[in-house]
Structure formats: structure tokens, C-alpha cells
């Protein structure tokens, strides 16, 4: 679903929050007011509900680069332990996952 949503948003970025239970990400949550542009996704975090199942974020990079920008790292540090970046051409192998410090982590797709 993330890859399809990213393709649909192209050439703009796509962004959403990740919902998990027992270490399994099972849903994306669209945050009201999110602004998506060709080089940014801006989450209106004041609209984020108090929901402890929200564990991080996902967003796309239309450039294809899945490394986090400085703005990404700043957002990661303020919002959950898991962050995924998917890159164009939005195939299963075009994603990277990071912790809140920007260190690469492993996320398995099942």
C-alpha cells in the first residue's frame, strides 16, 4: 500500500504515520493537514492523536535516494522509533528503515 500511495503521489512525496502491534507494522495512518510537495512532506504533528500504537513514519523520496535528509533526521528524533523512506521507482527493494537517531535498522516485509 505504501508503494502504491507513493506512486500515486509522484512527483510529490507521500507521507503517513505507522501503526504497529507486537512489533508488527500493520497499518498506515494519514495525519490531517499533512502537506506534500516535490521535496518535502510536512506533518502537522499537533494533529497527531494520543495513540501509543503509532510507532513512527513513512514517506517517499521521488529522487530515489532513501537516505534521510537533515529535516528527516529532525522529524525522526521527535516522533517514534521506526521511520521508513521509500524511493522511486517504488519497488519492494527501494526502501530503507531508520531509528529515531537516523541509524539504519532492519525491517522485514512479510
Image (spheres, rainbow, N blue to C red):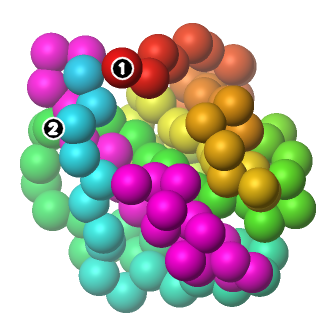
In this rendering, which labeled residue sits more in front, label 2 or label 1? Answer: 1
Residue at mark 1: 110
Q: Residue at x 69, y 19 (%)?
A: 104
Determine the secondary structure under disc 2.
Answer: loop
In the depicted structure, whether residue 105 falls above or below residue 94: above
Q: Nearer the viewer, residue 84 or 42?
A: 84
Q: Indicate the position of residue 96 as horizontal and vertical percent values.
A: 67, 31
Query: Image quadrant of residue 39?
Result: bottom right
Quadrant of image for the N terminus = bottom left
Q: Residue at x 33, y 45 (%)?
A: 18
Q: Is residue 18 above or below residue 4?
A: above
Task: Tell which circle, 2 or 1, labels the residue nearer the N-terminal end.
Answer: 2
Residue shown at 84% from the left, 53% from the top: 64
Q: Is residue 2 left or right of residue 23?
A: right
Q: Which quarter of the picture shows residue 99? A: top right
Which residues are drawn in magenta? 1-23
Residue 103, position as x, y percentages in the image: 70, 19
Residue count near mark 1 (Cα–Cα under 10 Å), binned few <14, some 14–19, many ≥20: few
Residue at 46% across, 54% down = 2
Query: Circle 2 sits on which residue?
Result: 53
The answer to whether residue 41 shows anywhere in this view is no
Residue 15 among magenta residues: yes
Amino acid at each position: 500500500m505504501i508503494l502504491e500511495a507513493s506512486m500515486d503521489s509522484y512527483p510529490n512525496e507521500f507521507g503517513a504515520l505507522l501503526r504497529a502491534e507486537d512489533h508488527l507494522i500493520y497499518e498506515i495512518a494519514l495525519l490531517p493537514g499533512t502537506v506534500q510537495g516535490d521535496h518535502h512532506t510536512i506533518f502537522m504533528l499537533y494533529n497527531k492523536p494520543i495513540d501509543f500504537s503509532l510507532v513512527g513514519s513513512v514517506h517517499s523520496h521521488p529522487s530515489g535516494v532513501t537516505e534521510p535528509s537533515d529535516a528527516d533526521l529532525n522529524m525522526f528524533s521527535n516522533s517514534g522509533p521506526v521511520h521508513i523512506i521509500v524511493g522511486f521507482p517504488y519497488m519492494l527493494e527501494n526502501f530503507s528503515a531508520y531509528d529515531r537517531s537516523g541509524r539504519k535498522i532492519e525491517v522485514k516485509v512479510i
